Image (cartoon, rainbow, N blue to C red):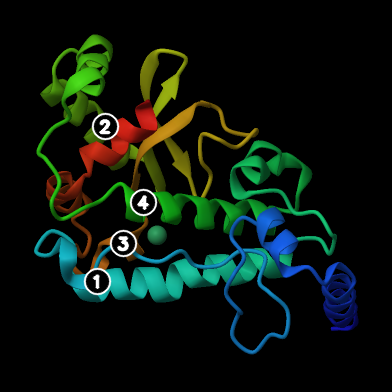
Amino acid sequence: MGSYKSQLNNRRAFIKKTAALAAAAATLKFSGSLSRGRSFPALFHLPQLPYKYSALEPHIDGKTMEIHYTKHHQAYVDNLNKALPSSDQVPALEQLMEKISTYAVAVRNNGGGHFNHSMFWQVMNPASGKSPDGRLAEAVTASFGTFEDFKKLFTNAALTRFGSGWAWLIKQNDQLVITSTANQDNPLMDIAEVKGTPLLCLDVWEHAYYLKYQNKRADYINAWWNVVDWNEVARRFQ
Ligand code: MN3
Protein backbone atom coordinates (compact mmCIF):
# COMPACT_ATOMS: atom_id res chain seq x y z
CA MET A 1 0.00 0.00 0.00
CA GLY A 2 2.81 2.36 0.94
CA SER A 3 4.82 1.63 -2.17
CA TYR A 4 1.76 2.02 -4.35
CA LYS A 5 1.13 5.43 -2.83
CA SER A 6 4.70 6.49 -3.39
CA GLN A 7 4.39 5.29 -6.98
CA LEU A 8 1.36 7.54 -7.31
CA ASN A 9 3.27 10.47 -5.88
CA ASN A 10 6.27 9.83 -8.10
CA ARG A 11 4.04 9.74 -11.13
CA ARG A 12 2.19 12.92 -10.13
CA ALA A 13 5.51 14.67 -9.64
CA PHE A 14 6.65 13.46 -13.03
CA ILE A 15 3.52 14.77 -14.69
CA LYS A 16 3.89 18.17 -13.07
CA LYS A 17 7.54 18.26 -14.02
CA THR A 18 7.04 17.53 -17.68
CA ALA A 19 4.01 19.81 -18.01
CA ALA A 20 4.09 19.61 -21.80
CA LEU A 21 1.28 17.17 -22.50
CA ALA A 22 2.13 16.88 -26.17
CA ALA A 23 5.60 15.62 -25.37
CA ALA A 24 4.16 13.09 -22.94
CA ALA A 25 1.70 11.85 -25.53
CA ALA A 26 4.51 11.41 -28.04
CA THR A 27 6.55 9.35 -25.56
CA LEU A 28 3.70 7.18 -24.36
CA LYS A 29 2.36 5.58 -27.48
CA PHE A 30 -0.79 4.27 -25.85
CA SER A 31 -1.55 7.20 -23.57
CA GLY A 32 -4.34 9.67 -24.12
CA SER A 33 -7.29 8.55 -22.05
CA LEU A 34 -7.71 8.96 -18.32
CA SER A 35 -8.05 5.71 -16.46
CA ARG A 36 -11.10 5.43 -14.23
CA GLY A 37 -10.66 7.02 -10.82
CA ARG A 38 -7.04 7.98 -11.39
CA SER A 39 -5.54 11.42 -11.51
CA PHE A 40 -2.63 10.57 -13.83
CA PRO A 41 -2.65 9.41 -17.43
CA ALA A 42 -2.57 5.62 -17.78
CA LEU A 43 0.62 4.36 -19.38
CA PHE A 44 -1.32 1.93 -21.52
CA HIS A 45 -5.00 1.95 -22.37
CA LEU A 46 -7.61 -0.23 -24.03
CA PRO A 47 -7.55 0.41 -27.79
CA GLN A 48 -10.86 1.04 -29.50
CA LEU A 49 -12.57 -2.07 -30.86
CA PRO A 50 -12.74 -1.57 -34.65
CA TYR A 51 -16.31 -2.99 -34.89
CA LYS A 52 -19.42 -3.65 -32.77
CA TYR A 53 -19.49 -6.53 -30.27
CA SER A 54 -22.03 -8.36 -32.46
CA ALA A 55 -20.15 -7.74 -35.73
CA LEU A 56 -18.53 -11.19 -35.86
CA GLU A 57 -21.77 -13.15 -35.28
CA PRO A 58 -22.70 -15.90 -35.76
CA HIS A 59 -19.07 -17.08 -35.58
CA ILE A 60 -18.18 -15.18 -32.40
CA ASP A 61 -21.15 -14.04 -30.33
CA GLY A 62 -21.60 -10.47 -29.11
CA LYS A 63 -21.74 -11.34 -25.40
CA THR A 64 -18.41 -13.15 -25.57
CA MET A 65 -16.86 -10.21 -27.45
CA GLU A 66 -18.21 -7.73 -24.91
CA ILE A 67 -16.89 -9.65 -21.88
CA HIS A 68 -13.62 -10.53 -23.59
CA TYR A 69 -12.93 -6.88 -24.50
CA THR A 70 -14.40 -4.93 -21.56
CA LYS A 71 -13.43 -7.35 -18.77
CA HIS A 72 -10.52 -9.56 -19.81
CA HIS A 73 -8.57 -7.15 -22.02
CA GLN A 74 -9.30 -4.21 -19.68
CA ALA A 75 -7.94 -6.25 -16.75
CA TYR A 76 -4.69 -6.96 -18.62
CA VAL A 77 -4.30 -3.23 -19.31
CA ASP A 78 -5.05 -2.22 -15.71
CA ASN A 79 -2.80 -4.88 -14.21
CA LEU A 80 0.01 -4.05 -16.65
CA ASN A 81 -0.12 -0.39 -15.57
CA LYS A 82 -0.01 -1.48 -11.93
CA ALA A 83 2.84 -3.94 -12.48
CA LEU A 84 5.15 -1.60 -14.38
CA PRO A 85 8.01 -0.13 -12.38
CA SER A 86 7.62 3.53 -11.45
CA SER A 87 9.91 5.31 -13.86
CA ASP A 88 9.84 8.15 -16.36
CA GLN A 89 10.58 5.89 -19.30
CA VAL A 90 8.25 3.08 -20.30
CA PRO A 91 8.94 1.61 -23.73
CA ALA A 92 6.27 1.14 -26.39
CA LEU A 93 4.46 -2.19 -26.13
CA GLU A 94 6.48 -3.99 -28.85
CA GLN A 95 9.79 -2.94 -27.31
CA LEU A 96 8.50 -4.07 -23.91
CA MET A 97 7.88 -7.56 -25.39
CA GLU A 98 11.42 -7.70 -26.80
CA LYS A 99 12.98 -7.34 -23.34
CA ILE A 100 10.23 -8.94 -21.28
CA SER A 101 12.72 -11.18 -19.44
CA THR A 102 14.00 -8.08 -17.59
CA TYR A 103 10.55 -7.38 -16.07
CA ALA A 104 8.43 -9.03 -13.37
CA VAL A 105 6.21 -12.00 -14.27
CA ALA A 106 3.12 -9.78 -13.88
CA VAL A 107 4.41 -7.53 -16.69
CA ARG A 108 5.00 -10.60 -18.88
CA ASN A 109 1.49 -11.95 -18.26
CA ASN A 110 -0.42 -8.67 -18.50
CA GLY A 111 1.79 -6.99 -21.11
CA GLY A 112 1.46 -10.11 -23.25
CA GLY A 113 -2.28 -10.09 -22.63
CA HIS A 114 -2.50 -6.47 -23.77
CA PHE A 115 -0.37 -7.01 -26.88
CA ASN A 116 -2.05 -10.26 -27.92
CA HIS A 117 -5.63 -9.02 -27.53
CA SER A 118 -4.90 -5.68 -29.25
CA MET A 119 -3.66 -7.68 -32.23
CA PHE A 120 -6.44 -10.28 -32.05
CA TRP A 121 -9.20 -7.63 -32.49
CA GLN A 122 -7.37 -6.26 -35.54
CA VAL A 123 -6.90 -9.54 -37.40
CA MET A 124 -10.64 -10.22 -37.34
CA ASN A 125 -13.21 -8.47 -39.51
CA PRO A 126 -16.79 -9.31 -40.48
CA ALA A 127 -16.18 -8.26 -44.09
CA SER A 128 -13.03 -10.29 -44.62
CA GLY A 129 -12.15 -12.50 -47.57
CA LYS A 130 -12.06 -16.27 -47.31
CA SER A 131 -8.37 -16.59 -48.15
CA PRO A 132 -5.29 -14.43 -48.75
CA ASP A 133 -4.23 -13.23 -52.18
CA GLY A 134 -1.20 -11.62 -53.79
CA ARG A 135 2.25 -12.01 -52.22
CA LEU A 136 0.85 -13.36 -48.95
CA ALA A 137 -0.96 -16.15 -50.81
CA GLU A 138 2.29 -17.00 -52.61
CA ALA A 139 4.20 -17.09 -49.31
CA VAL A 140 1.56 -19.35 -47.72
CA THR A 141 1.78 -21.74 -50.69
CA ALA A 142 5.59 -21.69 -50.64
CA SER A 143 5.73 -22.43 -46.90
CA PHE A 144 2.88 -24.88 -46.39
CA GLY A 145 1.81 -26.30 -49.77
CA THR A 146 -1.80 -25.23 -50.23
CA PHE A 147 -3.96 -22.78 -48.26
CA GLU A 148 -5.95 -25.79 -46.98
CA ASP A 149 -2.71 -27.38 -45.76
CA PHE A 150 -1.88 -24.16 -43.94
CA LYS A 151 -5.32 -24.09 -42.29
CA LYS A 152 -4.92 -27.69 -41.14
CA LEU A 153 -1.49 -27.01 -39.60
CA PHE A 154 -2.62 -23.81 -37.89
CA THR A 155 -5.81 -25.47 -36.61
CA ASN A 156 -3.72 -28.33 -35.24
CA ALA A 157 -1.39 -25.89 -33.44
CA ALA A 158 -4.44 -24.20 -31.87
CA LEU A 159 -6.07 -27.51 -30.93
CA THR A 160 -2.98 -29.07 -29.39
CA ARG A 161 -1.95 -26.06 -27.29
CA PHE A 162 -2.53 -27.61 -23.88
CA GLY A 163 -4.47 -25.39 -21.48
CA SER A 164 -4.61 -21.67 -22.22
CA GLY A 165 -2.61 -19.95 -24.92
CA TRP A 166 -2.39 -18.71 -28.48
CA ALA A 167 -1.73 -20.01 -32.01
CA TRP A 168 0.39 -17.85 -34.34
CA LEU A 169 1.40 -17.37 -37.93
CA ILE A 170 4.73 -15.57 -37.86
CA LYS A 171 7.32 -14.30 -40.32
CA GLN A 172 10.97 -15.32 -39.88
CA ASN A 173 12.96 -13.47 -42.56
CA ASP A 174 11.11 -14.58 -45.73
CA GLN A 175 9.75 -17.78 -44.20
CA LEU A 176 6.26 -18.22 -42.71
CA VAL A 177 6.07 -20.37 -39.58
CA ILE A 178 3.20 -21.66 -37.42
CA THR A 179 3.73 -21.81 -33.68
CA SER A 180 1.84 -21.60 -30.40
CA THR A 181 2.53 -20.08 -26.99
CA ALA A 182 1.32 -20.78 -23.46
CA ASN A 183 -0.63 -18.31 -21.30
CA GLN A 184 -0.16 -14.76 -22.67
CA ASP A 185 3.31 -15.25 -24.13
CA ASN A 186 3.93 -14.30 -27.77
CA PRO A 187 6.64 -14.75 -30.45
CA LEU A 188 7.92 -11.18 -29.99
CA MET A 189 9.04 -11.94 -26.43
CA ASP A 190 12.73 -12.56 -25.87
CA ILE A 191 11.80 -15.65 -23.84
CA ALA A 192 9.79 -17.24 -26.70
CA GLU A 193 11.02 -20.61 -27.96
CA VAL A 194 10.01 -19.68 -31.53
CA LYS A 195 10.45 -16.00 -32.38
CA GLY A 196 9.23 -13.94 -35.31
CA THR A 197 6.96 -11.13 -36.47
CA PRO A 198 3.34 -12.00 -35.67
CA LEU A 199 1.01 -11.89 -38.71
CA LEU A 200 -2.04 -13.73 -37.35
CA CYS A 201 -3.05 -14.89 -33.88
CA LEU A 202 -5.83 -16.94 -32.34
CA ASP A 203 -6.83 -16.84 -28.69
CA VAL A 204 -7.56 -20.37 -27.44
CA TRP A 205 -8.24 -19.49 -23.81
CA GLU A 206 -11.66 -20.88 -22.85
CA HIS A 207 -12.89 -17.33 -22.11
CA ALA A 208 -12.65 -16.68 -25.87
CA TYR A 209 -15.28 -19.27 -26.77
CA TYR A 210 -16.91 -20.96 -23.76
CA LEU A 211 -20.28 -19.13 -23.83
CA LYS A 212 -21.09 -20.28 -27.36
CA TYR A 213 -18.92 -23.36 -27.88
CA GLN A 214 -18.42 -24.66 -24.30
CA ASN A 215 -15.63 -27.26 -24.43
CA LYS A 216 -15.67 -27.55 -28.24
CA ARG A 217 -12.49 -25.70 -29.13
CA ALA A 218 -12.45 -27.32 -32.60
CA ASP A 219 -15.85 -25.81 -33.48
CA TYR A 220 -14.69 -22.36 -32.36
CA ILE A 221 -11.52 -22.58 -34.46
CA ASN A 222 -13.49 -23.81 -37.47
CA ALA A 223 -15.91 -20.87 -37.18
CA TRP A 224 -13.13 -18.36 -36.56
CA TRP A 225 -11.66 -18.90 -40.04
CA ASN A 226 -14.74 -17.06 -41.37
CA VAL A 227 -13.74 -13.80 -39.68
CA VAL A 228 -9.98 -13.68 -40.32
CA ASP A 229 -9.08 -10.33 -41.91
CA TRP A 230 -6.62 -11.35 -44.64
CA ASN A 231 -6.09 -7.72 -45.67
CA GLU A 232 -4.77 -6.99 -42.18
CA VAL A 233 -2.58 -10.12 -42.23
CA ALA A 234 -1.20 -9.03 -45.64
CA ARG A 235 -0.53 -5.53 -44.27
CA ARG A 236 1.53 -7.03 -41.44
CA PHE A 237 3.34 -9.30 -43.92
CA GLN A 238 4.59 -6.31 -45.97
MN1 MN3 B 1 -8.47 -13.68 -24.35
Residue 152 location (% of width, % of height): 18, 29
Residue 73 location (% of width, % of height): 46, 66
In the rendered structure, are the residues bearing label 3 and label 2 in contact, judged by CB atoms less than 8 Å apart?
Answer: no
The residue that disc 3 covers is 50
In the rendered structure, are the residues bearing label 4 and label 3 in contact, judged by CB atoms less than 8 Å apart?
Answer: no
- Which residue is located at x 86 percent, y 82 percent? 5
The residue that disc 2 covers is 154
Residue 117: mark in rendering: none
Label 4 element class: helix
Residue 51 location (% of width, % of height): 25, 65
The residue that disc 1 covers is 53
Q: In which quarter of the image is residue 71?
A: bottom left
Q: Which of marks 1 and 4 is nearer the N terminus?
A: 1
The residue that disc 4 covers is 120
Label 1 element class: helix
Q: Is mark 1 within 8 Å of ligand 1?
A: no
Q: In this view, does 194 lie above or below 11?
A: above
Within-10-Å neighbours for mark 1: few <14, some 14–19, many 20+? some
C-alpha distance separating marks 3 and 2: 25 Å
Q: Which of marks 2 and 4 is nearer the N terminus?
A: 4
Q: Earlier in the sequence, mark 4 or mark 3?
A: 3
Q: Which amino acid does label 2 sit on?
A: Phe
Q: Does the residue labelled 3 lie within 8 Å of ligand 1?
A: no
